[in-house]
Amino acid sequence: MSVSEKKKNEYIIPIAHVIIPNHCGGCPTDSLKSEVELAAIEKERLEKQEMERVCRMKGLPPSQNHQHTSADHLGERSKKHRVQFMLSYDKDGRAVTLNSSGEDSEGEGGDKTGGERPYSPAKPEEKEDHQSDDESGDQEDSEDIAEQYGSDLESDSDEGLLDSETLIGNPNILSTEMEAGMVQASKELPFVLKVPSSLDEFRMVVHSRSGEELRTAVERIYACNHPSLSPQNKEKLKSFFAILMEYCLELAKVPRMETFSAINGLARSLFKLAHIDSLYSAAVIRRNLDHLRDHTLPHHYPSYATLLIFKIVGTLFPTSDHRHPVTTPTMLIMASLLRKCYVKSMEDVYKGIIIVETMIEYVALSKRFVPEAIVFLTSLLGYLCSGRQGIIYPPFVHKCPLREQLGHAAALCSGQEGISLQSTSLMQLVAEGTLSTSACRNTVALHCTRLVQKLAEIYAGLPTFREIFQATASNLESMLVQENWPPCEKSVFTATLEFITSQSAVTKPALQLLKHKPVSIEFYKPEFDEEFEGGRKKAVNRTAGERQRLAHKVKREMKGAVREIRRDNAFLARERLNEQLERDAERERKTHQIMRELEEIQHEAKKELRKK
């Protein structure tokens, strides 16, 4: 590169950086909108779509209102047709203007004097071209607005569209298409929905609707009745949270994949509704927990609806708090279920695994120690070991039909290639009701091992890690001895066992007494006289000496006078006390004498009475 080209680039590159692209131009209406404005816009959009749906139900053409363009948006269309020019140089060093597409604006007969574009009045044809461009721009804008407000509902698919001439010539086709559109519009979910006041009313709204339509209906209810639009909406949505919770529990009574998917889709809406009033939502959950405590059979695992409550609590409320009015009781209930409920069937195994998985989600951040989960997983791995070689703990029992069933499934699978369960989920088996096959045994083993690995990762830093997972590692070793596991599952077992072994091999330091630093006694801070001079102070001259002697004599005489005054006061006090004591003694003597005389008189009077 020559020196002249370097200089040109040093000039052209900064100029190109200074030029602002067209798409970076801001508009006064591009400011961020608040939550209230967004809620109002969403409600307006839904109301417009509902109006269009009602028109289609009645067989009326949708209203096509003219979209007015404000003065702030007039420059948007011109940006599409505006050409950006850039100054450049050719090989001879002459200035050349290039447009944004990189074409030379001069052409063959262009002006080469300065690269500037000369002004020329527009011809009539050019004006017509510009006018057609503007009309096309307006049409594009109207199409964008129609797409934004959901005008694509006017026709379900492009394949069903017919030409206008065909429709005019065949009125039967027009009436058939209109009737089909009316029927389809009547089956659609309304865009504007009011807040249901009861569970029956909500059932009527979502009757025979799919899980996706159920989620859409709840979202539209929240959008049309946003708390920021009206003060009454907050109270309505608070009660709607209780209704939606009750409906979810009703759905969970029948375990199916469609039900689980529908409830999973409602999680976001439940979170929004719960945080409108956290105290009220917490009271609703506590009410369900109290009902569970009072109506659950002892030593039996609860229903899937109850397990859904545990999942919802972990989604709606914080689980890492030291104490929480909702999360803490839920944790205690789950721990009590794992500690007291007997495992009698595969369904109990599935429910226990779901509870353990929920507890792991609860303690993932706080890393609380939950021994009930570890005991459950260890005992379940012991059930999966053949020949009763595994270690189990209560409430698991040694002689159990379930243990025999799992051992029989292991014998059936021996010598055969294991079933790969990479895609098989626990919820699928629960929904299908497949509870007694070897595939269930492999699924339980895979889920149980993965949960053990999660717990081992959470408690990896504990000093008692080896003692906690010692029985679990022993059961995993007994399981690996069996050769009927699929390769994918065997790799999971091996990885978990290696992780536990590596963490258990960490040496622990010996216990030592804590070395406390000696606590020093608190002393008072002494006050030092920085100008202190030992011995008697010598006077500077005779006058000062006489003054010091007089001051010392006055001080000494003052002390003597005070001492004499104190002695006199003490003497006077003693004299007053002696006089007071003498007066008291004299009064007491006279009182005794009077009493003796009165007693003698009374004695004489009684004697005279006895003589008579």
Image (spheres, rainbow, N blue to C red):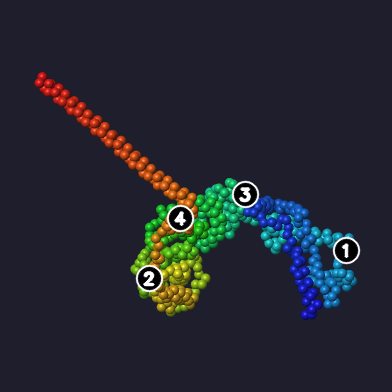
Q: Residue at x 82, y 60 (%)?
A: 132
Count of marks placed on residues: 4
- Identify the residue shown where x is 35% and y is 42%: 564
Instruction: Rate crowding at label 4 as few (under 14), some (14 to 19) or many (20 or more) other CA atoms within 10 Å.
Output: few
Indicate which disc, 3 or 2, sits on the residue closer to the N terminus.
3
Q: Earlier in the sequence, mark 2 or mark 4?
A: 2
Disc 2, SS: loop
The CA span between labels 2 and 4 is: 70 Å
Q: Nearer the viewer, residue 349 or 375?
A: 375
Amino acid of disc 3: Leu
Which residue is label 1 attached to?
119
Q: Nearer the viewer, mark 4 or mark 1?
A: 4
Asked if residue 412 shows in the view, the reply is: no
Element at badge 1?
Answer: loop
The residue beneath circle 2 is 511
Distance from disc 1 to disc 2, alpha carbons, whole Å, reads 93 Å
Viewer-side label of 3, 1: 1
240 with respect to 10 (left or right): left
The residue that label 4 is drawn on is 538
Query: Disc 4 marks which amino acid?
Result: Lys
- Cα distance, mark 4 to mark 1? 110 Å
